[in-house]
Amino acid sequence: MRELELSRRAFLSTSGVFMIGHATPDAWAQAAKTSPKSPNNPDLLADSLDAYLAIDKTGKVDVFYGAIDGGQGLETSIAQMVAEELDVPLSSIRMIMGDTRRTLNMGGASGAQGVSRRGTSLMKAAALARQMLVEEAARKFGAKPTDLDVKDGVIYLRANPARRIAYTKIVRGRPFQAKVRWNGQWGNPHDIATDAPLKSYKDYRVIGQSPRRADLTSKVFGEQKFPGDVRLPGMLHARMVRPPVAGAVPTSVDETSIRHIPGAKTVHIKNFLAVVAPKEWDAVRALRAVKVEWSQSNPAFPTHREIHAHIRKAMVTQRTIEKENGKVEEGLVKAARVISGEYEYPTHSHASMGPGCAVVDVRANGATIYTSTQKPHYAADGVADLLNIPRESVHVVWMFGTGSYGRNDQGDATADAAVLSKALGAPVRVQWMREESLGWDPKGTASVNFCKAGIDEKGEVIAYELISRGFSRENVATNEGRASGTLAGQLLGAKLEPKNTFNIPFASYTFANNRVGWETISPLMDRASPLRSTHLRDPYGPPILFGSECFMDEIAVAVDMDPVDFRLRYLTHPRDKDAVRIAAEKAGWRKRASPRKDIDSASDVVEGRGIAYRRHFDTFIALVAEVRVNRRSGVVEPTRLVCAHDVGLIINPETLRHVIERQLIYGTSRTTVEELAWDRNMVTSIDWNSYPVLHMRHAPPRIDIHLIERPEAAPSGAAEMALGLVPAAMGNAVFDATGVRLRKIPFTPDYVKTMLNT
Amino acid sequence: MSQKMTFNVNGHRHTILIDDPDMPLLYALRDDLGLDNPRFGCGLGQCGACTVHIDGVPTRSCSLPVSAVGKGRITTLHGLGDRKKPHPLQTAWIEEQVNQCGYCINGWLMEGAALLARNPKPTEEEARAAFGDLICRCGTHNAAVRAVLRASKQA
């Protein structure tokens, strides 16, 4: 029953967003017809329990987790989930992560679904394994399975605990050879079902504890190897040569310009150009020395300062209304007052700490890839497509590495290394440079939110409209699974496969006449663009919630209501309401309308508070930001963030707190300092000065996190949900302090000063 | 014309052939000596991922030419302490579970250790100041400060 509930909840919670809807009998029937062979290793069958876990002769449990841990503790949290259902010690779990030979494609770090989807799938596999083992023990004991219990991998008769048998004695290193019901999907939607019941949360012993992360100790002692640390015999070091102007291609390369560097040479295939050398520093020297003639290119980009004006006037290529009820226009006509607000969000780079880096060894019989991409199975698919070799001949060895925060440059560096290794017949290590990582990673691109509300005489909202307009969020795919989606593929002439997609975060506000939708415009450059768009962490959160949740405060101001009370008036779901109430209560929120009226007009430094709320999948969050604004300098500092967070069942409370705290700091960076700059020709953010990111002096010094306990609810995700609230909560707090509404991210001192002075 | 240079790293002497005296120390450590702790983050001395100690002073190895190292004693993260004999800050770092991806870890641990060496009981403000010039994209800033304060209490 529990299992049915869990799986149904998981399906329901995501089906509205990703249109998976595989819970119907038809979908399962259809799924049964799909080949369960993993395209990356045909010996692995998605409908076999053995593809999910194995118990060896010593009792170690290998868990085959076909996604990754980007440093947010999934390795340990998912191990806890499996240990719980299997009733084995946590220390006996070995997580096999992202290896394309040993795991199925379960997507990757994506949508914060590591626990909610991958973890729950693997729990179901563990429950089935436990059930099979208990049934076998029952046969041996001549007892009923319900008479048995399990502790630490040992099955015993409850009435006579001396009658016992270890899992290892039953398994003896053999596979389970049992079927699971697979939903026929690879990647993020992958899931399974079994008939084995799951435990009640009341019986949990491992879930709900906070064991330390397995990876952290080896990182602290400098033992953890990353892809850049892989050294293979005969390996060459490569640097990609990128054009000074976007769209320019190499027309001639002067090989003599690098002749003085030992072993250095160029690799020039169509528009793809790199330098390689046996020693890494020599590759860097070759990059600096190589003389290249580039074709004329005139991208004539509207600059980052002009991009929002461009978005406003550009032709809309697709308009999609995601949610509509009532008659918005009629509501607006009837309204006593109509208010509107526009909000601009900039372009952000993934700006990973480590620029893209991968080692690839292409041989006659296949390729081995060492990468920290967040979607290793897609990296294998993409390299197979790029090199035109069978998918099963490509083996991705996933390794811990730099945080990706979405589809960063790791996948592109992997594709570069694959092309070079094939061309040179040697293993190749590609390391992108800092300038390249900011300039050429796929981007989270700019958008404008148009918000409108009609209010009647009684102060009731009788019409609401939110339209977000910007570039498709998938000009290149959210993974590198096709050559067309990689920079290398685009330089080598792959047929482009852009998608026209956008999305609006769910909100449960109930307005009588309501319309929420999006509009996309054409990309600024079609092929090999430094501004090509893709998913950046919480792709639809910060850009759109900045508009929608600031505008909620604008309406509250218009009706002279406290922003918390105003939200509670239009929220219906108890978990939404609880998150808002608890955040306010924990922040010591005092009821009043914004802006505050007690500010000393002579004071340079003023303080205010703001709130923002969201629901993402089944995660319910509210964030209160307290800010200090220096009206003379324009500096906005968050002095305290208070987050109420309801994720359903909590697997590892300490890890959850860490994940929330760190993403709120990351969200502060996106809100206060980050903005990609470019001119007519090319990205001009080339380092950590021209692409500023948060330093310690601007980090919120105090972050209070309140975890709402709902052990009866299925676990949802946590890895990116809270960060999307930072822009709006801070923007609302600045308004509270100053009476001035900020309409553009980032809140740089110059921008804030300009707004305060107008 | 290559020349021999000798480096003292983590208490061991290593002699390597250097072609270019302008080569940053980072490449000698990683490529010639196979010491992977310092990492390439920017190559511009802006982020700290490549930090080592030279005679106890945190130094960005991506921007220091090998010819400028001289007789300086180099310590990498691994030389700071290991599982058998951890530096107190490494212990505190694990207790506070500071990092996520850990790509930036060399800068933060090496700066933090240097702070504790010159000021064993720093205030929170002093800890924040010591980390002022480092980058971490995962947002571990406050956790790093907590780790320094924890280590200082245990000292």
Image (cartoon, coloured by chain):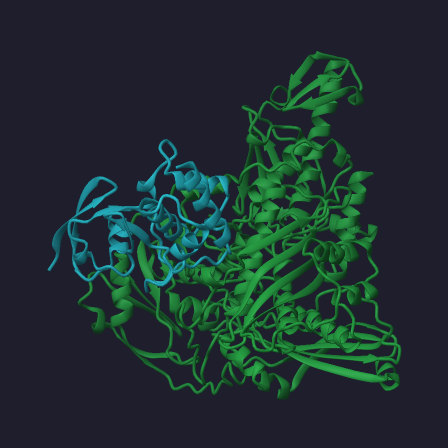
On the rendered image, what quadrant is the N terminus of chain A found in? top right
Is residue A108 found left or right of A330 in the rendered image?
left
**Chain letter, green:** A
Q: Colour of chain B?
A: cyan
Classify residue A81 as left or right of residue B108.
Answer: right
Q: Quadrant of residue A53?
A: top right
**What is the x, y in percent for residue A352?**
46, 61
Quarter containing the C terminus of chain A: bottom right
Query: In the rendering, at what x and y percent does residue A510 appear?
Result: 83, 67
Of A416 and A353, the residue lying toward us: A353
* Nearer to the camera, B67 or A63: B67
Image quarter of residue A691: bottom left
- Residue B71: x, y in percent? 15, 49
The residue lying toward the viewer, choosing from A1 and A262, is: A1
Vertical comparison of A421 with A5: above or below: below
Q: Residue at x 48, y 60 (%)?
A: A411
Residue B99 visible from this viewpoint: no
Coordinates of residue A679 in the picture (x, y in percent): 45, 83
> Is A396 above or below relative to A326?
above
